Amino acid sequence: MKQLCLLICFSFFFGNVTAQQTEYVDFKTVKVNLYSVNHDLDEFGGEANYKFEILKDVDSIYLDAKNFHQHAIALDGKTQLHDYDGEHIIVKNKFKANTIYDLKINWVAHKPKKAIYALGDQIWTQGQGKYTSHWLPSIDDVNDKVEFDISITFENGYAVLANGMLVEKVVGDVSTKWQYNMKKPMPSYLVALVIGKYDKKTETSKSGVPLEYYYYPEDSQKVEPTYRYTKQMFDFLEEEIGFPYPWQNYKQVPVKDFLYSGMENTSLTIFSDSFVVDSTAYNDKNYITVNAHELAHQWFGDLVTATSGEHHWLQEGFATYYALLAERDVFGDNHYYWQLFENAQELIAQETAGQSTSLLNPKSSSTTFYKKGAWALHVLREQVGDVAFKTAVKAYLEKHQFANVETNDFISEVEATSGQDLTGFVNEWLLESKLPEDAMVKSLKQSSFMQEYFMVDCEAYTSKCKDYLSSYISDKAKVKVINQIPDKIEVSAFQNNLEVRQAIAKYVGEIPIELKLAYESLLDDKSYATIEAALYNLWANFPEDRIKYLQKTKDIVGFNDYNVRLLWLALHLNTVEYQPEKKQDVLDELISYSLPGQHFELRLNAFNYLKLLGGFERKSITSLLEARKHHNWRFSKYAKNLLAELETNDNYKSLINTLKKN
């Protein structure tokens, strides 16, 4: 590529070369000092000191910097003129190949639009893709890895977390400076920052790596069920992968209203606080799969990073597969094959809908990248054997550590260790859009557990169904039976384990009188999903006992979206004879859960019940209008769709239009 043009044509040519700067420049390290950070981010700024090497003579380099309000730079200690187009800080100089330069940038940003979010007493980042440059001058290119050392000054009384090891903490009268050190490079989308009110529990892995579990002070009783099996999975993955954990420590921290389930920021996984659970919620919805997935990413995605979207499966497929292996170590082979089966069902549904794509298609769905990618690795390991597979993975990581990879980098290692030509595998699993269903079924049938599941079929063998629920078949097979014949359940079926009883609550909606007593026992189960379903079904089937059911469940909250509590409020409002003097208080409580400040999942659940009850009024509709601009895109989309639906009602339409004007 030719050198960049002179200033007269720079702006025209610049847009065509942004993705190729790595040919000219290698950013080595950056020391970041965030010294101007407040709670609502209307003041946000700091200083970044980059060290970079010029690979070829060039007359301009740039850093990505979105919508900064102030910026000043110095090159090798001297103030330097620069251009700024709203997205890039462009430094013009006669840069010479094989030369190291220092670049200092001071900047201020006001309320960044993306990548960093302020929610009450929490601040957190999410930079996946190319968004870190909204709050930090950085490189929006996964192929340029930098060693980040970050220090943050913030008000006393808060925990401040960033990538790497905390090497110094200086407490002042008003604020504290936290200094974190990384020893190895990573792409800027993995830079992370969290500020909030947290306590911490620490374990140490078998290899001596500190494992730090952060939690809200009020959630001390939820630490164990939330982080259950973390150390076991960490130790397993180090041994299974064969390459030591590549970073200094491993921290995990929950945040409110996160955009995804979790994010594998280098040495600092951020995850949704919806996964902070008590011992009952653990039985229904726990953090284990997300935990294992984000941990596996510390190798696959963080240590080795795909060069482009075409090779995205090298991150998501590998993280999904190794999470399955970690769960297999905890829960056994049957669990492993069941997860593969569920993934296969999702992939088959996608193909039935005509949406299957190649695993190397950069526009493929998450289902393809995650689930088909994991299946491809499972089948590949079966084909080449454990020894060849594990040897190849280790060699692949050793050869490409702290660098970028393409699919052939991995395939070539497997071919070398196995001595096999993998052209057929690549064609069938990576290049072909059609799902290899026959190969998947053949693999699943290697499990006697899955063979039994496929065999148990009440639609095909009706004469055996009466005995299935009292036999020694697996709980998964019994759930299948209940789903197929919910109207033939007998009292003996309630003597099964938690999962089977949960299926009874889910699928048996019409309750025969002879099952009433047994069905009422479901309200005592250690499962909020079971309690929610059983409460509604009992309330609907036995009107004469509604007060009894409401009294029994009046103190149960449920998940973080208050699934049991919100159902209880709705049933209270529809039980005329129960506490009539408290109806307005109950409605007010329901409305309060829809308002800003609450977790978005709780607000969404409250909105659903208000819609069902026809209970929207000024406060809740104002909240719904506000939710259209919520940073969580799923919640924002939901709010827009619900508003459009409400506007078809003339009464709501008038109120909505009035509130929109205000």
Image (cartoon, helix red, strand yellow):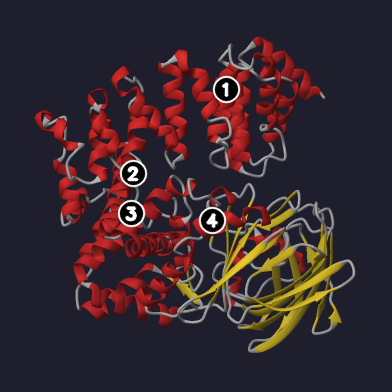
Sort mark 4 into few (<14), some (14-19) or many (20+) by Cα contacts within 10 Å: many
What type is the residue that disc 4 sits on? Answer: Gly
Circle 3 residue: 372
Q: Nearer the viewer, residue 286 or 76?
A: 286
What type is the residue that disc 2 sits on? Answer: Glu
Q: Nearer the viewer, mark 1 or mark 2?
A: 1
Give the mark nearer the N terminus: 1 vs 3: 3
Circle 1 residue: 570
Q: At x 33% / y 65%, what residue is drawn?
A: 329
On the rendered image, what quadrant is the C terminus found in?
top right
Q: At x 89% / y 66%, what residue is drawn?
A: 174
Give the mark nearer the N terminus: 1 vs 2: 2
Q: Nearer the viewer, mark 1 or mark 3?
A: 1
SS at mark 2?
helix
Circle 2 residue: 346
What type is the residue that disc 3 sits on? Answer: Lys
Q: Nearer the viewer, mark 3 or mark 2?
A: 2
The answer to whether 120 is drawn above or below residue 430 in the figure is above
The answer to whether 118 is drawn above or below residue 581 in the figure is below
Q: Nearer the viewer, residue 165 or 509?
A: 509
The answer to whether 414 is drawn above or below residue 600 in the figure is below
Q: Nearer the viewer, mark 1 or mark 4?
A: 1
Q: Nearer the viewer, mark 2 or mark 4?
A: 4
Mark 4–mark 3 distance (CA, rounded to whole Å): 20 Å
SS at mark 1?
helix
Q: At x 60% / y 42%, what residue is drawn?
A: 633
On the rendered image, what quadrant is the N terminus found in?
bottom right
Q: Position of residue 377 (x, y in %)?
A: 30, 63
Q: Position of residue 568 (x, y in %)?
A: 56, 27
What type is the residue that disc 1 sits on? Answer: Ala
SS at mark 3?
helix
